[in-house]
Image (cartoon, rainbow, N blue to C red):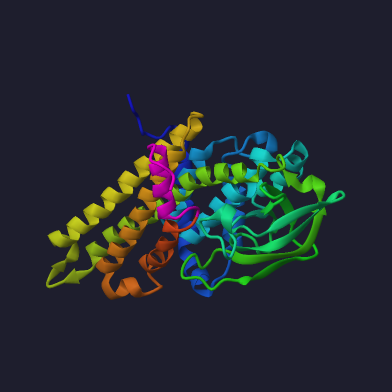
Amino acid sequence: MIDFTLTDEQEELRSTVERFARESVAPVIGDLYERGEFPYEIVAAMGKMGLFGLPFPEEHGGMGGDYFALCLALEELARVDSSVAVTLEAGVSLGAMPIYRFGTEEQKARLLPSLLSGERLAAFGLTEPGGGSDVPGGMRTTARLDGDHWVINGSKSFITNSGTDITSFVTVTAYSGEREISTIIVPNGTPGFTVGKKYSKVGWSASDTHELSFDDVRVPAENLVGERGRGYAQFLRILDEGRIAIAALSVGLAQGCVDECLRYVRERAAFGKEIGRYQAIQFKVADMEVRAHTARLAYYAAAAKLLAGEPFKKEAAIAKLVASNAAMDNARDATQIFGGYGFMNEYAVGRFYRDAKILEVGEGTSEVQRMLIARALGLPNG
């Protein structure tokens, strides 16, 4: 028998985060978003709740949960705001997870406790200005071993959580040989490592995103994460997991659109009655709920495969594709239902509309997801 019912513990987590998002995030995030300010107080509160440590064992300072617990938290946060949700998602899956998955015991002991408590953040430097989806082909950053130090040169773009006041380091992918990619820890403040000014973005305005540059940056040889030359395999694993998390975030945005519309259509009147009484509106909201529900099942299924230790690449790609499409479609429909008010930033659906599009791009575009699914079905590469 297949059962998608949450356990008591999972439901307690979900309801706790839902209440936090409604009571602590919703009242303040609009102003932060409009000013483009990073939500330091919210991040600190999430840290105290243990959200940054959800999928990590207690021995490293985590909460002893799993990846599905993280996804539940991301969904509930994104029902209110995606900037906050992506800060958590990137802090966990891109910041702490590479160290936990591939780092040495010394690296874990030194770096993980502050990351899992939310006191510090870390970033993952993968994308480059000329690279995009073609990561190996577009990568120009190099790391040369000079005695007992790596010397790094290059640049990275669109890196989340890389320039906050609490960012500790960035894990950088670089060519360490002619055909080998390695990942190396570069602490913030290292000479030659420059965090560029923050981007002016269409959405996710209260999250932190910067371009990074490396000019003869020297870091100790022991800052290598995992085995030399295994960087490509490492970031593929990290991205596969991250796609499930982004799917959960996308579901949250899609469901948030339903939440906002249900409130609005009961309050807004046109031509003598509540607009929620018109079948055209009812069908539109019903379609929105169907998208959110279907996308939720997709990420639940992908997370189940991950937790069972089974191959999950295809399921993660399906979940990310379906959920990001649902988020974009629901944001568009919610804006239409709200009419002119949907175009105003003071309403949540305005933020949702601005935030939705990046979900079809970040951590693998929709085209990349289709490519991965096709390959999993045995279709030829190229």
Q: Quick check: can you spot residue 199? A: yes
373 drawn magenta: yes
The stretch in magenta equals 363-382
Of residues 129 and 104, the one nearer the viewer is 129
- In the rendered image, the vertical position of residue 212 relative to residue 102, given as above or below: below
Which residue appears at 56% of the width and 60% of the height?
131
Q: Quick check: can you spot residue 53? A: no
- In the rendered image, the vertical position of residue 221 relative to residue 214, given as above or below: above
Horizontal side, residue 59 vs residue 284: left or right: right
Horizontal side, residue 300 vs residue 99: left or right: left
In percent of width and height, residue 13 lies at 48, 41
In percent of width and height, residue 332 lies at 31, 64
- In the rendered image, the vertical position of residue 99 relative to residue 121, given as above or below: above
Of residues 345 and 295, the one nearer the viewer is 295
Task: Give the position of the N terminus as an image quadrant.
Answer: top left
Kindly indicate the quadrant of the structure image that contains residue 279. Answer: bottom left
In percent of width and height, residue 334 lies at 29, 63
Which residue appears at 41% of the width and 48% of the height?
371
Horizontal side, residue 184 vs residue 83: left or right: right
- In the rendered image, the vertical position of residue 380 relative to residue 161, given as above or below: above
119 drawn magenta: no
Which residue appears at 46% of the width and 36% of the height?
312
User: What is the tally of numbered marks visible in this picture?
Assistant: 0
Q: Residue furthest top?
A: 1
Of residues 345 and 237, the one nearer the viewer is 237
Which residue appears at 50% of the width and 70% of the height?
201
In percent of width and height, residue 2 lies at 33, 28
Kindly indicate the quadrant of the structure image that contains residue 210. Answer: bottom right
